[in-house]
Amino acid sequence: MRLTVLAAVLILSAPAEAKPRRSPWLLFPIDVRRFEQVSSKFGVRRLEGHRKLHRGVDLVAPPGSWVVAAREGKVADAGRARACGWYVTMEHENGWRTVYCHLRSDPRRMGIVEGLTVPAMGVVGEVGSTGHSTGPHLHFSLLDQKGRAQDPLLALYTPAETLRVLKRMGLAR
């Protein structure tokens, strides 16, 4: 009896598995006035009967809503891929990359080309449903310096926080 109570105390007092801390450094990547919901979070999920890592977060907004750079950076790549559809990849000063997928049309037609420096909140495309997509949304990925996918929701300011930052900067009312 005594051992069982002691074991229970040890189990209850053991630290819970640490949750990754949210530490935002990226502005919300779509027009915050048009954002509807997160439809799929980062992590392992079941797709077509297989477990697969969803390497980003799906942000739902009406088609044609602006997709914006979450932070100043250079366009590393822009084009079309089978699963991603029309996309833009940006490299940031810290060596991390952000990827914007399922864009409505070819971002190069908007002048978003490799090597272009885009300011934070600069438009890089429009929400679409190209590639493997079930409806209009932005698939937003965050890659560290080694190209490993990280949970973007831990690095993103929320839409409300982004709006407050923009107001402080005099870029929104």
Image (spheres, grey):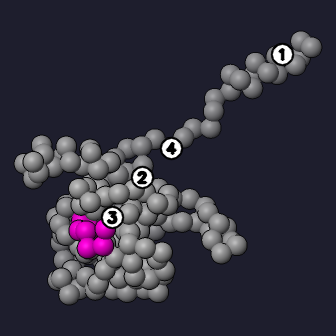
Q: Secondary structure at mark 2?
A: helix
Which class describes the residues within 10 Å of circle 3: few (<14), some (14-19), or many (20+)? many
Circle 3/circle 2 CB separation < 8 Å:
no
> What residue is drawn where x is 35% and y is 57%?
36
Using the image, tell me which numbered label, if any, was put on residue 16. none
**Badges 1 and 4: C-beta atoms under 8 Å apart?**
no
The answer to whether the residues at label 1 and label 3 have Cβ atoms under 8 Å apart is no
First in sequence: mark 1 vs mark 3? 1
How far, Cα to Cα, is label 4 from label 3? Answer: 27 Å
State the SS at label 4: loop
Task: Where is residue 140? Give x, y as percent.
Answer: 39, 65
List the single residue furthest toward the top.
2
Q: Which residue is mark 4?
A: 20
Give whichever of 92, 118 is nearer the camera: 118
Find the distance from the CA under tag 3 to the CA under tag 2: 17 Å
Report whether residue 25 is seen: no
Residue 109 lies in quadrant: bottom left
Q: Amino acid at mark 1?
A: Val
**Disc 1 from disc 4: Cα separation:** 31 Å
The residue labelled by disc 1 is 5
Within-10-Å neighbours for mark 1: few <14, some 14–19, many 20+ = few
Q: What element does badge 3 sit on?
A: loop
* Residue 54 image offset from top left, x and y in percent: 54, 66
- Tell me what residue is drawn at x 76 percent, y 18 percent: 9
Read off the residue under disc 2.
153
Q: Nearer the viewer, mark 3 or mark 2?
A: 3
According to the image, label 3 marks what residue? 61
Q: Residue at x 40, y 82 (%)?
A: 130
Sooner in the amino-acid sequence: mark 4 or mark 3: 4
